[in-house]
Amino acid sequence: MKVFACGDVVPGCSHTFSAADESGILAQVAAHATADHGLTDIPPALVDQVRSRITAVQA
């Protein structure tokens, strides 16, 4: 299981995400970035920041 907290990249955002793998997290984060942060294009640097802060947790 993988987890990511948006607040690790966007201060003040309380959304968290979990999925079986990194691609599941990235799909959720992309939808959230569009819906809640107004991003129409997600820059590669932001994807790199998200990837670097995804952590594995014991199920």
Image (tube, rainbow, N blue to C red):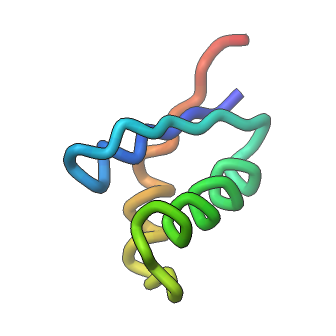
Above or below, comparing residue 54 to residue 59 in the picture: below
Task: Specify the farthest residue to the top.
Answer: 59
Viewer-side residue, 16 vs 20: 16
Quarter of the view holding residue 50? bottom left
Please tell me which residue is depicted at 44% across the width and 84% down the height of the picture. Answer: 43
Viewer-side residue, 27 vs 56: 27
Residue 13 shown left or right of residue 41 in the figure: left
Above or below, comparing residue 17 to residue 25 in the picture: above
> Which quadrant does the N terminus fall into?
top right
What number of labels is visible?
0
Task: Specify the farthest residue to the left.
Answer: 11
Viewer-side residue, 33 vs 18: 33
Q: Position of residue 16 (x, y in %)?
A: 50, 35
Above or below, comparing residue 3 to residue 22 in the picture: above
> Which quadrant does the C terminus fall into?
top right
Please tell me which residue is depicted at 60% across the width and 20% down the height of the picture. Answer: 57
Residue 51 shown left or right of residue 17 in the figure: left
Above or below, comparing residue 4 to residue 10 in the picture: above
Please tell me which residue is depicted at 50% across the width and 43% down the height of the picture. Answer: 54
Q: Position of residue 2 (x, y in %)?
A: 64, 33
Q: Position of residue 21 (x, y in %)?
A: 75, 43
Please tell me which residue is depicted at 38% across the width and 78% down the height of the picture. Answer: 45
Q: Position of residue 33 (x, y in %)?
A: 49, 65
